[in-house]
Amino acid sequence: MRIVHTAVAGCLVMVTGACGTGEVTYAAVRAPGKAADANRPRTVLGKMDGLPEGFFSHARAPWRPPFRPRARACRLLFDAAAGRPPREGLSGTTAATYQGAHAGELAGVAVAVYDGGEAAGHLAALRDALSHCATADGGTPYDRLAAARAPLPGVGGPDAAGRALSGRVGGYPYRMHVVVARSGHALIALVHAGLTPPDPARTAELARLLVREVGTLDA
């Protein structure tokens, strides 16, 4: 039974993008004259210290959604966590994945920096998407995650929101926490997922760490 579980974990790790040796990726979308400022988000995920116990600090390739959700609200959330945030006012973005100690556990993180007050508006749109992403599915019963009715414990307030999703990926039980937050001019999207139900306390710890580290971009 342990061999089967290990094989399933390995399969889902590959599907959800937590394996491989790819480095943190970055895309600059500012005008050429502002390129130096746009490079700053990359430093945040590239030197992430203080991750919750059990997470490997080495940044891997960005999170890859295990399937393409049919619901637009869910697609917006999955895209943001995969490093494809809303583009209006976007000046730079970076994304990475950190592997956890439990079966198939990962934390997919994306940071997007915006000009002016665009980050607040995009956070409002992603919060709305959280409230409308009741079911994320790829069109088959093998890839279907349903949202919990209760909010994600430990994550909330005017600048952060989260939701828990549970169901199946590739036909196997899977759990996922999705968090969106804002820190100054930056928008943060986090996915904490795995075969083993992710701990809400560790998700909240991850979110607090990201908000704190990303806050240095406005310093």
Image (cartoon, grey):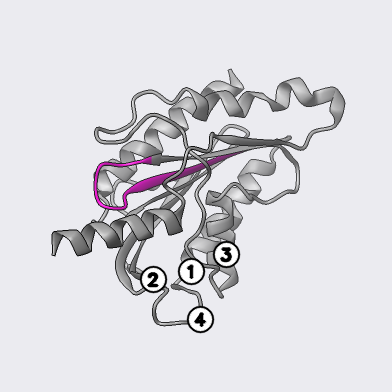
- Callout 1 amino acid: Cys
Label 1: element kind:
loop
Q: Marks 1 and 2, how far apart in space?
A: 20 Å
Measure the alpha-carbon separation of dots 4 and 1.
Answer: 15 Å
Instruction: Write the residue at 54% across / 63% down.
Output: 129
Between disc 4 and disc 1, the foreground one is 4
Tell me which residue sits at (50%, 69%) in the image: 132
The residue that label 3 is drawn on is 75
Type of amino acid at the residue the image marks with label 4: Gly
The percent coordinates of residue 91 (x first, y second) are 73, 35
> Which tag, 3 or 1, sits closer to the chain's start?
3
Residue that badge 1 annotates: 133
Whether tag 4 and tag 3 are in contact, CB under 8 A, the answer is no
Name which residue type carries label 3.
Arg
Within the image, what quadrant is residue 212 found in? top left
The amino acid beneath tag 2 is Gly
In whole angstroms, how far apart are the C-alphas of marks 3 and 1?
A: 9 Å
| Residue sitting nearer the eye, 204 or 196 | 196
- Left or right, 174 with respect to 33, comes to left
* Label 4 packing within 10 angstroms: few (<14), some (14-19), many (20+): few
Query: Which residue appears farthest toward the top when viewing the image?
Result: 219
Identify which residue, 91 or 174, lies in the foreground: 174
The answer to whether residue 168 is above or below residue 92 is: below
Q: Is residue 195 visible?
A: no
Are there few (<14), some (14-19), or many (20+) residues within 10 Å of tag 2?
A: some
**Marked residue nearer the N-terminal end (4 or 3):** 3
* Labelled pair 4, 1 in contact (Cβ < 8 Å): no
Report the span colored magenta: 99-112
Question: Which residue is the site of mark 4?
Answer: 139
Q: Secondary structure at mark 4?
A: loop
Name above or below for residue 2 compared with residue 33: below
